[in-house]
Image (cartoon, rainbow, N blue to C red):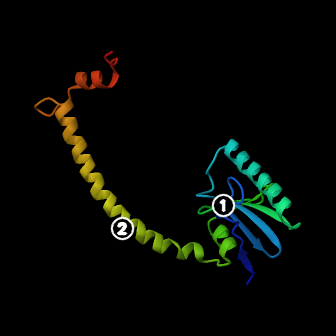
């Protein structure tokens, strides 16, 4: 097993804007920007991530010994296809979780507790959603429906699109 140590800068995980994790592994310092999945941003957002990597490198090189640096765009799920993007590596799903933990099965084991917690929250959300939907429906019927239940389209249109009174 490879030796992995996480180096957390003073005050938190981020050493520079847009950087989430600094990790030393086998004599290389990895600078990681973590995103949810592989399709997380447009070209300008990706360019900003690359700029953030360069800024982090300048900060590290002024404050630390000459250690090889590698930049990583880590994605919590998905697949990257070609992981080498030139300026950085894009590690997704299993590759990312194994990279930060050394455990090739971590990506599978973390899902069960997350799923359990999500189910708990989904049940609470469904109850609250039903209450809000019922309140909204009652208010809509009171404000925009005829006594027979048909929508009063003229009243709805006036509410939605007429000029505001001055």
Q: Work out which residue is located at the far top of the displayed protein and give it.
A: 166
- Name the residue rendered at 71%, 56% in the picture: 16
Instruction: Residue 152 in the image: state x and y as whole percent.
Output: 20, 26
- Name the residue rendered at 74%, 59% in the picture: 82
Query: Closer to the camera, 69 or 156?
Result: 69
Instruction: Residue 110 in the image: state x and y as whole percent.
Output: 53, 73
Query: Closer to the camera, 69 or 73?
Result: 69
- Which residue is tagged 2? 120
- Name the residue rendered at 80%, 57% in the picture: 59
- Which image quadrant: the N terminus? bottom right
Disc assigned to residue 20: 1
28 lies left or right of 114: right
Instruction: Residue 52 in the image: state x and y as whole percent.
Output: 74, 51
Bin the neighbour count of mark 2 within 10 Å (Cα to Cα): few under 14, some 14-19, many 20 and up: few
Disc assigned to residue 50: none
**Tag 1's secondary structure?**
loop
Instruction: Residue 94 in the image: state x and y as whole percent.
Output: 63, 70
When asked about the image quadrant of residue 44, the answer is: top right
Query: Closer to the camera, 80 or 4?
Result: 4
Position of 47 relative to 7 (above/below): above
When asked about the image quadrant of residue 137, the answer is: top left
131 lies left or right of 164: left
């Amino acid at each position: 097993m490879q030796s992995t140590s996480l180096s957390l800068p003073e005050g938190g995980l981020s050493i520079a804007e847009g950087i989430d994790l600094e990790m030393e592994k086998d004599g290389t310092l990895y600078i990681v920007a973590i995103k949810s999945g592989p399709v997380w941003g447009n070209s300008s957002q990706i360019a900003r991530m690359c700029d953030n990597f360069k800024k982090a490198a300048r900060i590290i090189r002024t404050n630390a010994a000459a250690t090889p640096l590698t930049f990583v765009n880590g994605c919590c799920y998905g697949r990257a296809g070609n992981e080498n993007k030139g300026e950085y590596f894009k590690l997704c799903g299993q590759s990312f979780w194994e990279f930060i933990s050394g455990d090739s099965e971590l990506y599978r084991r973390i899902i069960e507790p997350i799923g359990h917690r999500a189910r708990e929250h989904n049940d609470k959300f469904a109850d609250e959603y039903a209450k809000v939907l019922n309140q909204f429906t009652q208010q809509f019927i009171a404000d925009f429906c005829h006594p027979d239940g048909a929508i009063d389209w003229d009243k709805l249109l006036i509410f939605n699109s007429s000029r505001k009174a001055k």
